[in-house]
Image (cartoon, rainbow, N blue to C red):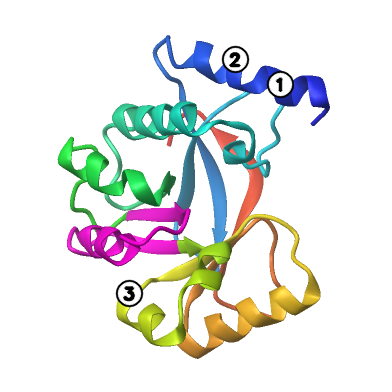
Amino acid sequence: MTGVQTCALPILVTKILTEPLEIWYLQLNDFRDRPCFEVKCRINGLSNRDNVREYLEEDILFSYERALLANAKNLNLRINYFFHISATKIIPLINDGLIKSSSNLHFCIYGYNEKLPEQVQALKNLNVKVYLHYQILKEINVLNLAKLRIDGIVINEGLQKETRDEVLLIARSFDLILITNHEFNDYEKCIYKTDELKREL
């Protein structure tokens, strides 16, 4: 994105949030061939692989995350749905009834904080799947990571070889799934984005 587009995106998202939100579903390739889709809003200027989180301030981002959950209705129990949310907002979203118990819901979590174990446990209690953004791993030792019982790791950007090797080592050690922008030829348990965006499923 250009600098002008980056500056304009928060304004555009704020405007989108004042209207009924259009939910779109980005198809994901799953290593088990299960139907998987990322729940998102179509935003002009962003590609399917762009991470909207990089361009929004915290208050706008939380409103966006909340709106996606509130407007994603009548979900098919045979389809796996992936949502991206901030760790600090997990408990408020659960308390407001926007995250409910369902084995076909998957949550990709961003932003380390001291209450992360409590937040992850709150999600696990709802029988949903939990994935941590790879940067959170830098803040957690191996023993505490094992206690979290997460399902996978999110990698939505290019990594330096050293970092990539470290993440793959953790993934292999804990038998975790990777959520990525592209297929990893050296790791089988991978769910990655396609270019197919659907309005309805």
Residue at horizontal 37 percent and vertical 55 percent from the top: 106
Dots 2, 1 in contact, CB < 8 A: yes
Badge 2 is on which residue? 11
Q: Is residue 133 visible?
A: yes
**What is the crowding at mark 3: few (fewer than 14 residues within 10 Å), some, or many (at least 20)?**
some
Q: Which residues are magenta?
A: 105-131
Q: Is residue 31 above or below residue 82?
A: below
Label 3 sits on residue: 148
Residue visible at 31% across and 80% down in the picture? 147
Amino acid type for the residue under numbered disc 2: Ile
Q: Give the Cα distance between marks 1 and 3.
A: 37 Å
Q: Is residue 145 left or right of residue 124?
A: right
The answer to which of 4 and 102 lies nearer the viewer is 4
In screen coordinates, is 65 left or right of 160?
Answer: left
Residue 35 lies in the magenta-colored region: no
Three-letter code, disc 1? Cys
Q: Nearer the viewer, residue 138 or 179?
A: 138
Mark 1 surroundings within 10 Å by alpha-carbon count, few (fewer than 14), some (14 through 19), many (20 or more): few
Question: Badge 2 local density, few (<14 within 10 Å), some, or many (20+)?
Answer: few
The residue shown at (48%, 47%) is 37
Q: Secondary structure at mark 3?
A: helix
Please provide percent x and percent y for residue 191.
55, 63
Query: Dot 1 corresponds to which residue?
Result: 7
Q: Is residue 72 above or below residue 94?
A: above
Q: Quadrant of residue 43?
A: top right
Quarter containing the C terminus: top left
